[in-house]
Image (tube, helix red, strand yellow):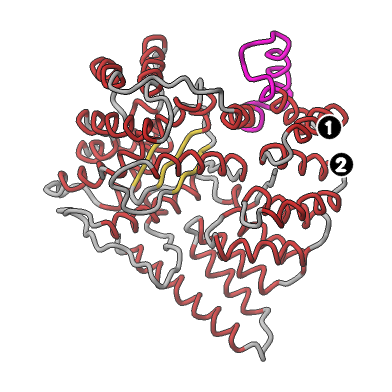
Amino acid sequence: MQLKSAFITLFSTLLTFSVLVSEPLKAQTNFTLPDLGTSALQALPLEKEQAIGKVMMMQIRGSSPVVNDPVLDEYLTTIGRKLVANANDVRFPFSFFWINNPEINAFAFYGGHVGVHTGLIAQSDNESQFASVLGHEIAHVTQRHLARRMQQQQDNSALTIAGMIAGILATVVSPDAGIAIISASQTQSAFSQLTHSRSAEQEADRIGMQTLNNAGFDPYASSEFLTKLAAQIRYKYKPPAFLLTHPLPESRVSDVRLRAQQFEKRQLPDSLEFNLAKSRVIARYHQKPEAAENFFRKLIRENSFYNKTALNYGLGISLLDQKKLDEAAPILDELLKSDPKNLFYIDTHTDLLIAQKKAAEAVKFLAALHENRPNNQVITLNYANAALEAEQYDVAVQILKSFLLEKPEHNLGMQLLADAYKKQDNLAAYHEANADVLAQYGAYLKAADEVQKALNFVEPQELIKQQRLKALLTQYRQMQKELARL
C-alpha cells in the first residue's frame, strides 16, 4: 500500500524544545501529565513513565520520518510481540514502529515504545539477528534503565524534564543531533541520560539473549550482530548510530559470545517474511526505483545466496513504482499465486490493480479477504484505500470506522478516514477527523482550529454533536496548559 499524506510533509521539521512546550498533548480525559518538577527528579512510577512515553511518541511522529507501512508494521509487531510474550517483568503493552533511516539503530524509551531504523533490517543477515536487537531494547524497558538513570540524576539541579525529553528524543532518532544539543547546553548529566551504562548494556545483553532464546530464535545471533558492529567500527571513522547510545567495549563482545555458549545453537530455516520485509525496505525506502531495479536484477542474475523469492518481490516493487506495469504484473501475479494468503503479496497486488485503473476489482479482491480476516491492518487499510480509489466512499468510511474502534490511535487509518470524509463532502466530519490526525503529531493548536471549523459545518439542530465538539475543544486547550507545566 502506498499513501502520500500532506500531514507527513506538514510536520516533517525536527521539533525542538520550544515546540515541546508550545504544543499540547493529545486530549484524553483519562490522561494527565506527570508532575515531575524541573529538578530533583525522584523515582519514576509506571504511570508517569507511560505518560512521558506518550509525550515522546507524539513528538517523534511530528519530527521524524516514521514509516506508515501496514505490511512492515505487521511484520515488526509480530516479531516484537513474540519477544515480549517470552520476556519477564513486562509491566505494560509494548508498541513498535519504524523510522526511515539507513543507519543501523534501534531505541527504546519510556512506556514500552521501541523504534527501529529501516537500516537495521536491511543490514541484518537473518531474522534472529534482527530479533536480537529488539530483544535487547525490550530488556532496557523491562529493566527500566532510563527510569533508573533518571533517579540517579535527582540531585542535579540543571536537568529539566522537558530538556531531558528533548535530548533523548533527538538522540534516539538522530544521534548526532542529540549529542549536539548536549554539547550546546554543556549538561553532562543530560548526556548520561542518553547513553546506557556498561552495566545496563550487560544486563540488557543477558536478559535480551534469554528472551531471544525463549522466543525460539538463535541466541548466538546476539554475538554475531555485535561482532558485525565491531567490524564496522574498525573500518569506519564514524561508528554506527546504535553505538552512540549503546557503548561497545571489546569486553562486551567477548562476554556476549561466552554467554551464548550456555544455550544450544539453533539451525533455523531461512525466514521468508524477514527476507520479504528486507527487500521491501530496500526497494521502497532505501533506493530510488531505478537503482532498486538494477540492484535486484544484478543479484538475480548472479544467482546469489539471497532468497530468490524475496529478490523477485523486490524487483516487482521497483518495477511497479516506476509504472512498468507490464513487467511488474507477471512477477507479482506469480508471487500471489504461489501464496494467496501472504500479506506482502496481497499488498502489492492491490497496488498493481490500482495502478492498472482496476480499483473496483481490487475492492472485490479485498472484500473476500476482509470477511475472513476483518481486523488485519494490511487487508483492512488496503481495502479502504481501494474503495477510495474506486469512489466507493461509504464503503471506505464504514470499514475505517470499524477498524478505528479497535485501533483508535492508528495513524494511517485516521488519515484515510479524513480523506474519505473529504471525498464525501462531509466537512464537519472531515475537520474533526483532521483534528484527530493533527493531535497524533502533538499539533493541538492546529487541532483546536480544525474542531472550530467542524463546528461551523454542524447544523443548528445537531445539539449533541455541537456539545461533543465543544467538549473536545476544551480538552485540547486544557492539555496545552498541561504541557506548559513542563
Give me the C-alpha separation between circle 2 and circle 1: 10 Å
Tag 2 near tag 1, CB within 8 Å: yes
Residue under circle 2?
A: 356
Mark 2 lies on a secondary structure that is: loop
Residue under pointer 1 = 329
Q: Which mark is residue 360?
A: none
Residue 422's image quarter? bottom right
Task: Indicate the position of residue 128 as horizontal and vertical percent values.
Answer: 45, 27
Pinpoint residue 87: horizontal percent, then vertical percent.
Answer: 34, 41
- Camera-side residue of 471 and 411: 411
Q: Nearer the viewer, residue 262 or 284?
A: 262
* Above or below: residue 254 compared with residue 329: above
Q: Nearer the viewer, mark 2 or mark 1?
A: 1
Name the foreground residue: 480 vs 227.
Answer: 227
In the picture shown, does residue 104 fall above or below 405?
above
Q: Position of residue 207 (x, y in %)?
A: 28, 34
Towards the viewer: 401 or 196: 401
Disc 2 marks a residue whose amino acid type is: Gln
